[in-house]
Amino acid sequence: MDKALLAKTAAAMVAKGRGILAADESAGTCEKRFQSVGVACTEENRRNYRGLLFSTPGVEKFVSGVILFDETIRQKADDGTPFADYLARKGVIPGIKVDKGTVEIPLAPGEKVTEGLDGLSKRLDEYFKLGARFAKWRAVITIGESIPTHTCLYANAHALARYAAACQAASIVPIIEPEVLLDGSHTVERCEEVTEATLRATYAALAAYNVVPECVILKASMVVSGKDCPRQAGVQEVAERTVRVLKRTVPAAQPGVVFLSGGQSDLDATAHLNAMSAMPGLPWPLTFSYSRALQNPALKTWKGSAANKNAAQQAFYHRAHMNGLAAQGKWKPELEKQAA
Ligand code: 13P
């Protein structure tokens, strides 16, 4: 474990005004996204699309790191450079998704646990050689009638902690992502309660597995109303509830917190981040680690055609720019119109 490297990587991931692009969609998720814009989900199309995002001129001003999928870290940019090296040369840290997705927890109906611990240390050593300096593991917590159960929180927290310890041993910074899903009709109060319980269980497990708090990044879901809840909490309420939960649970020693967008609209994800980052006295920098909220406009503009590449890159640049400002509490809705 190279603690100096871990600390350096973690600090760079959450550097001022920069955040992380999640481009680690599995082939299945990519299929859904590509289908929505009528593009065949072939390996070459996935390479083309990711290459388009990574080669966006100037985007490195706002993007500190990119989470890659196993296939992508083995692919090359148009000039023949492996993507990980290509990003590193731009000053963007390559990261890697290492979980293997979710399965139902036996005897816990409707609840899931994330797999991928078998052989993980060996895979991490290989990813380090391929250039990855941070990793991601996503756990999924569903809110429902009588869920999440303690079983679900416990199972996911322990998997996250074992993963995080393995990453640190391999000198790779772990992003721990316990995502509380926004699907459902639950209230924002219920989301706050579940998010707090989830983070408490997660940090207890991290301590039990000797994970070094200074070398972990939390990828948090925001405290929002369930998608189908009749009362949707406003921007300020989401910001206040989210920061309250984080302050209660996340050690101040942690280098930073990044957020997932989780199905929020692009503008909501930016506005929420902005409202939180503008709060005084935060113990850690906050920034983005969005997939959909950064990529949606670019994907819709690209539609699989090389002729749309420049316009798609501009759309991606714009969202990265807006979120880079939001990470500093400097975003304003008017800025959206100027660049549109
Ligand atoms: P979204 O921003 O689309 O939620 O994706 C973030 C992510 O990496 C989920 O694991």
Image (cartoon, helix red, strand yellow):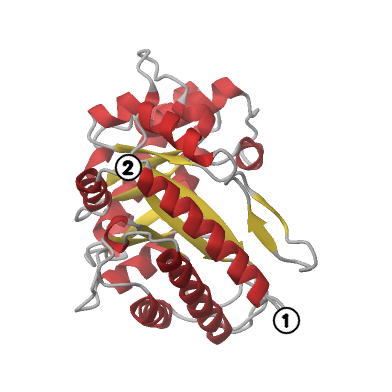
* Quadrant of the rendered image containing residue 112: bottom right
- Mark 1 = which residue? 146
Specify whether 177 is left or right of 257. Answer: right
Q: Secondary structure at mark 2?
A: loop
- Please name the residue shown 51% across and 42% down the image: 98
Q: In the rendering, at what x and y percent does residue 115 appear?
A: 63, 49
Q: Which is more foreground, mark 1 or mark 2?
A: 2
- Mark 2 = which residue? 171
Above or below 240: residue 136? above
Q: Residues within 10 Å of mark 1 (few under 14, many from 20)?
A: few
Q: In the rendering, at what x and y percent does residue 292 appear?
A: 50, 50
Specify whether 88 is left or right of 297. Answer: left
Q: Secondary structure at mark 1?
A: loop
- Return the disc, 1 or 2, that comes first in the chain's sequence: 1
Q: In the rendering, at what x and y percent does residue 108 appear?
A: 76, 68
Residue 25 is at least partly visible in this image: yes
Alpha-carbon distance for marks 1 and 2? 39 Å
* Type of amino acid under label 1: Ser
Q: Residues within 10 Å of mark 2 (few under 14, many from 20)?
A: many
In front here: 260 or 337?
260
* Dot 1 and dot 2 residues touching (CB under 8 Å): no
- Please name the residue shown 55% across and 57% down the image: 159
In front here: 134 or 273?
134
